[in-house]
Image (cartoon, grey):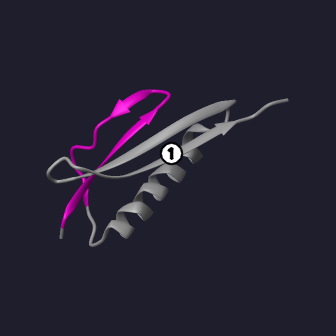
Amino acid sequence: MPKYYFDVENGHGHESDDIGSEHQTLESVGLHIGKILTDIARDEIPGTHSARIIVRARDEQGNHVGKGRLSFETEW
């Protein structure tokens, strides 16, 4: 099964995924991007007024295969 890597950018900088995870399809890769975004948002958004999180997926050859982005902002 192909392995994909999920790199994250957020307010704390850039984290490269050196471990990766196996996915049968690109649809599965996209769903995993969404899971990563929601997991990070749950941990980082409470207690902040704004956040921007980007997850980029790459295959074993380093080719970009997908991206997800989440932005959050409150005003009062």
Say left or right for 73 vs 16: right
x then y, percent, for residue 16 = 28, 38
Asked if residue 13 is among those painted magenta in the image, a careful observer would answer: yes
Q: Nearer the viewer, residue 5 or 39?
A: 5
Specify start and end residues of the magenta stretch as a single range: 2-21
Say left or right for 14 vs 45: left
Tell me the quarter of the picture where residue 46 sits.
top right
Q: Point out the residue furthest to the left here.
A: 61
How many numbered marks have been drawn onto this rendered protein structure? 1
Tell me the quarter of the picture where residue 9 sits.
top left
x then y, percent, for residue 72 = 65, 39
x then y, percent, for residue 53 = 50, 39
The residue carrying pointer 1 sits among few (fewer than 14), some (14 to 19) or many (20 or more) residues within 10 Å by Cα, namely some
Q: Residue at x 42, y 55 (%)?
A: 33
Residue at numbered disc 1 = 69
x then y, percent, for residue 60 = 16, 53
Quarter holding the N terminus?
Answer: bottom left
Q: Residue at x 41, y 61 (%)?
A: 30
Mark 1: amino acid? Arg
Say left or right for 59 vs 27: left
Eyeballing the image, is 15 above or below 18? above
Quarter holding the C terminus?
Answer: top right
Dominant secondary structure of the residues highlighted in magenta in the image: strand
Eyeballing the image, is 39 above or below 13? below
Tell me the quarter of the picture where residue 32 sits.
bottom left
Eyeballing the image, is 31 above or below 75? below
Q: Secondary structure at mark 1?
A: strand
